[in-house]
Image (cartoon, rainbow, N blue to C red):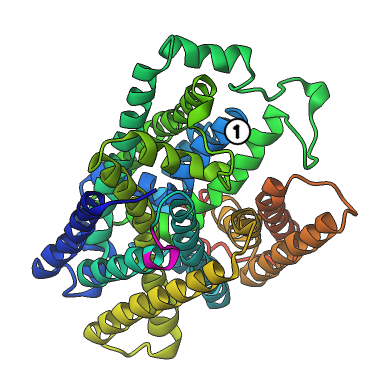
Amino acid sequence: MKFGMWNWIVVVVYLLGMVAIGYWFMKREASSSTEAYFRGGQKIPFWVAGLSIFATMLSAITFMAVPGVAYAKDWNGYIGQWPILIIVPLVVMFYLPFYRRLNITTAYEYLEKRFNVATRVIGSVTFMLFHIGRVAIVLYLPALALSSVTDINVLAAIAVIGILCVIYTVMGGIEAVVWTDAIQALVLIGGALLCFGLIVSQVDGGLGAIGSAMSEEGKGITASWSFHDISIGKESTSGFVLFVAFMLANLPSYTSGQDVVQRYVTTSSEKEAAKSLWMNIAMVLVGSAIFFGLGTALFVFYQENPELMDPTLPTKDSVLPFFIMQNLPVGVAGLIIAGVFAAAQSTISSSLNSVATAFVTDVYGRLLKPESLDEERLGVAKWVVVILGVVGIGISCVLAEMGTDGVFMLFNRFIGFALGPLGGLFALGIFSRRPNGLAGLVALLSGVLTVTVTYFLNEAGVINLMPLLYGAVGFLTTLGTGLVLGFWLRASDEDMRGLTIWTQKK
């Protein structure tokens, strides 16, 4: 479909507005020091930090993929949002106090204090490598879905999203990132509600028809809650297994991912940081329900109007942009597509700034040039943002030219390789006072090795494991190995003072 001049005008105005926010924060001396560039001077309002956490975890892929899954299948994926009810209290009670009271810039500074410098650097580098791939994927998949239903060139979409995102991230630092995140989260929720309301007004029976589809046609939550049906196989539909798998897949992001942890130290106090997390519970549960509901509404709409559906639509992820282009007025469609671009940018900008923060704090300032001045470190951080942005755009364009299929599923499986073991290491450090630095390092490496071997055995058909459980394998292996090694490789009580829940300074 023709995207049209007016839609392009709306998209360009929106994206230039994001750049203007970056420029405004640059003029406010938001990028005058590493303290301002990495932590925003610790003056970000809690509600902005909360919206930013939500937007960081919600990518453009999610914005299109979740309605696509609900359209094609059911609401089982919504079970994956419920663990937030456990994750947030855990973070507020046991993790947040260490990040705030130790006055850290990156999460991995805690690892050095608790274990040794090797675990800090390995943890930080692991996070950085993971986000290089994440930037490329988050650029590629939304551009691919949009190009499949419009005349937008996939390479042009990648370039526009990526370049403008790099510009405002370089200029405004973390302040520009979190404020644009907040705006983009509201645009996404507003766009989804607009589409949902439009569908409800057009289908016979309105909300009742959508409710009937969920209850009578198997479009709601169909997972089994019987203990007899518990299975960890690839085709498992056990609600208990899905809940645990999603919890151990998401917990590491909230406890060891610099892109999320960085938000905890941008607010004025520990109490304000906690409020941003409590707010995130409502955003996740309500926001996700809106996206799943939109997918069910799309199913009902095209079931009643089958002549409007394109049978050659390449993937289910394309159904939402297809509906937007087909049914929304000119200009409004442009605004929602701008929201898709915005979702990609919110995730990418978080990755760019957090990787720059991790590199400068944990590698450049700790190992390469510890005597460097703050001004020099700030310059390095900006160059890291630019270089990572260029690399991400380049890899994304290569993926587009190759026409790679199944990238998102493969990427999701590799999340367990990086974040699972890293989350297990943080849990080991905070909840146990026995393991020393060597025990922590061996535990981390064993977690990575175990999840790697598990992946290849699963792909070869030797074992049958739900891919979503890779994160749980890495997390539990690292934690369990560290606890066992702690009986022989023990840390002194003096070294642990103020660094575990058992030795925490009040």
Q: Position of residue 13 (x, y in %)?
A: 18, 56
Label 1 sits on a secondary structure element that is helix
The answer to which of 47 and 288 lies nearer the viewer is 288
User: Residues in magenta?
Assistant: 152-156
Q: Position of residue 8 (x, y in %)?
A: 25, 55
Main SS, magenta region, reads helix
The answer to which of 327 and 284 lies nearer the viewer is 327
Find disc 1 in the rendering and name its residue.
72
Q: Position of residue 156 (x, y in %)?
A: 37, 67
The answer to which of 338 and 425 lies nearer the viewer is 338
Is residue 370 visible in this depiction of the protein? yes
For residue 127, above or below residue 297: below
Left or right: 400 as drawn, with respect to 445: left
What residue is at 48 percent from the left and 12 percent from the top?
A: 209
The stretch drawn in magenta includes residue 450: no
What residue is at 61 percent from the left and 45 percent from the top?
A: 248
